[in-house]
Image (tube, rainbow, N blue to C red):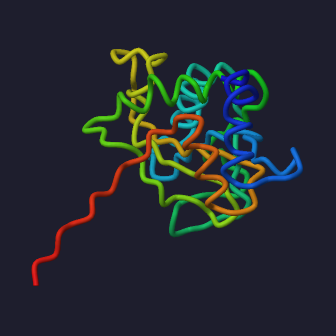
Amino acid sequence: MQTYYEDTVRAALTKELGCTNPHEVPALEKIVVTTHCGKATDRKQAVEDSVEEIAKITGQKPSVSYARKSVANFKVREGEAVGARVTLRGNTMWEFLDRFIHVTAPNIRDFRGISSKSFDGKGNYAVGIPDQSIFPEVELDKIKREIGFDLIFVTSATNDEAGRALLSALGMPYRVHKKEDSVA
């Protein structure tokens, strides 16, 4: 996937976006995979399960996130483990992106494409995954609980159009919105 980006996508984006400097061409910098176990009654075990699942999916051991403040309404104490995250860069990032685009995303139930509206204004894209069963690395009979994930694709693009062009060129399966015919 990295060689595809360097050989094909970079040249196409240079022409499409009108970049004069090769450093202006948007690139994928990192992919962040996060999860949060806020509503689980047995939060400690839920965090351990999510760490195990993220490690299987990404091939990298995630770091555990801890609560910074105690919040009585959410039954969270300061210093309590509430989630996990992993940052993918380099070869593992490109491998994960390839698996996500070609294997994982099409496994989503009733898949018609991923929304193209989840950009943050600076070219970064986020997508939520409702459960881990769409990843082929997860054994379905060993799932203890459903764990949702957020995938954040961090790019060097300066705006949403450049980020969307980069991810589209890499093959991100965006949903095609049909224009409805209006009858007057």
| Residue extending furthest toward the left | 183
Q: Position of residue 47 (x, y in %)?
A: 57, 37
Residue located at (45% from left, 46% from top)? 40
Foreground pick, 167 / 94: 167
Q: Is any atom of residue 114 visible in this view?
A: yes
Question: Does 120 appear above or below 21?
Answer: below
Q: Quadrant of the N terminus?
A: top right
Q: Position of residue 69 (x, y in %)?
A: 71, 64
| Residue extending furthest toward the bottom | 184
Residue located at (28% from left, 35% from top)? 109
Q: Is any atom of residue 61 visible in this view?
A: no
Question: Does 55 appear above or below 21?
Answer: above
The quarter holding residue 89 reads top right
Q: Position of residue 102 (x, y in %)?
A: 47, 24
Foreground pick, 82 / 58: 58
Q: Is residue 184 left or right of residue 91?
A: left
Q: Quadrant of the C terminus?
A: bottom left
Residue located at (55% from left, 43% from top)? 168
Residue located at (59% from left, 35% from top)? 170
